[in-house]
Amino acid sequence: MMSLSPSLGSSYPWLKELKSEERGLYLIHLLLTCANHVATGSLENANIALEQISELASPDGDTMQRIAAYFTEALADRILKTWPGLHKAINSTRVVDLVSEQALVRRLFFEVFPFLKAAFLLVNQAIIEAMEGEKVVHVIDLDAAEPMQWIALIRGLSARPEGPPHLRITGIHVRKEVLDQMGHRLSEEAEKLDIPFQFNPVVGELEDLDVERLHVKTGEAVAISSVLRLHSLLASDDEPLRKKLPLALKNSNGIHLQRALQMSQNTLGELLEKDTVNGYSPSPDSASSSPLSSPVSPKVDTFLTALRGLLPKLVVITEQDSNHNGSTLMERLLESLHSYAALFDCLESTVSRASSERLKLEKMLFGNEIKNIISCEGAERKERHEKLEKWIQRLDSAGFCNVPLSYYGMLQAKTLLQGYNCNGYKMKGENGCVMICWQDRPMFSVSAWRCRNSL
């Protein structure tokens, strides 16, 4: 049993004297060192590193201080899970309505960042163009959390030269009241525009979805939309693979640490620069360094095959373009430190440090995601974001082929990004898909697909 003696954690007054860039570099060094101690079971040394980090990190400081605060919390939570009874006792009185919290932070994310707004423009325009001339349109939303997307679609379809189709939207969500509210808002909008409309609510987890509940009918033109949802299905495939990991892979954390600490200080220092946060490069081979990173994912493959069985005319997928599904702790820490640095930098460049909305976003959304990526394993680890190329491979294997996104949709999205009075938001095409970026770093991908061999 490790000792938590206060003598280990003597104060470090010299830490307070570090300049901003020196502090940022030292925080990165401490986070990597602490993660390596956690991964190798050296919890006493991890505790010492955590105490030093706590002297420097702050949830209301500069970008690096804020990021470090949430990575520190995640690493500490992972250590506590070494003693399940202690971890459960500490969290036993914590009352959190996860679904309500997720709805709140998703709404904040939608309002503060342009990423989802741009994605919705691309998705809706792709659907409108794919459904040209169709009289009965059925849209299936795999995570029915944002009615604004479909209100915009209803308005777009009402303006068709040939007149609006009969529109049916099926929404999937774990909470009935969320679906009831969405159904009410969409029905009101459709009635106002005199569009024949029906809303089909499906209450339940996507992981447990029976496609029969979608009630797809003969003669309907089907479009399926998934926004930031498919990656969670990868958790179901983790446990069997984790048990088969070779010993060399389980012990590879030290190699990642050595590689990271050999990077030049100038490169690490770029994390502190607002406009060059993406200069800190994670391991180039981390995307393919383990079996868990491979696109072989039975649960997702089965789900995509089931969707293909519905013969959709279009499937549009939006995902965070990051590699947070590595098998080792060090791998995930390096990749997530890199990608969340960009998101935190985005807020630093556009929102006041004192903003309550910013604090809520960082703690309730990014902080919780970081904790899930770093602290959790097995089916509990839901935040398994992967790069676009992985999704391309999966969809291709499931019998889909890529449909280039609409030029008009891209024009709309680009205009939206330019309207944010910030030069950091950008967009670029890649393999017929669209990457929505902060600076030159891809943050979210949007891709459209149809069944192979279908017209």
Image (cartoon, helix red, strand yellow):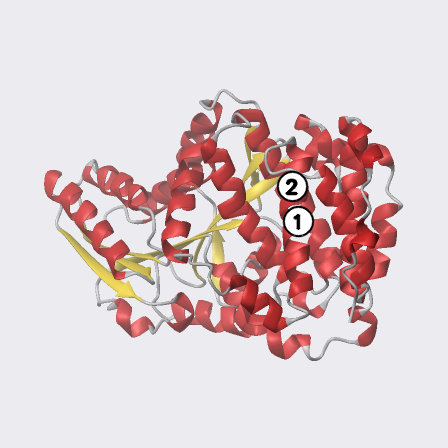
Q: Residue sitting at 27 percent across and 65 percent down?
A: 202
Contact between marks 2 and 1 (CB within 8 A): the answer is yes
Amino acid identity at mark 2: Ile
Determine whether, in the image, residue 332 is placed left or right of residue 158: right
Instruction: Residue 205 in the image: state x and y as whole percent.
Output: 38, 67
Residue that lies at the very extreme toward the top in this rendered image:
421
Local packing at callout 1 (Cα closer than 10 Å; few below 14, some 14-19, many 20+) is many
Q: Secondary structure at mark 2?
A: helix
In the image, is 308 to the left or to the right of 372? Answer: left
Residue marked by disc 2: 67
Q: Is residue 193 left or right of residue 397?
A: left
Residue 17 quadrant: top right
The type of residue carrying mark 1 is Phe
Nearer the observer, 56 or 336: 56
Please name the residue shown 63% across and 51% down the image: 73
Q: Quadrant of the N terminus?
A: bottom right
Residue nearest the viewer, comparing 161 with 42: 42
Mark 2, other Cα within 10 Å: few <14 / some 14–19 / many ≥20: many
Which image quadrant is residue 277 in? top right
Which x, y percent locates residue 343? 58, 38
Q: Is residue 436 visible?
A: yes
- The residue singled out by tag 1 in the image is 71
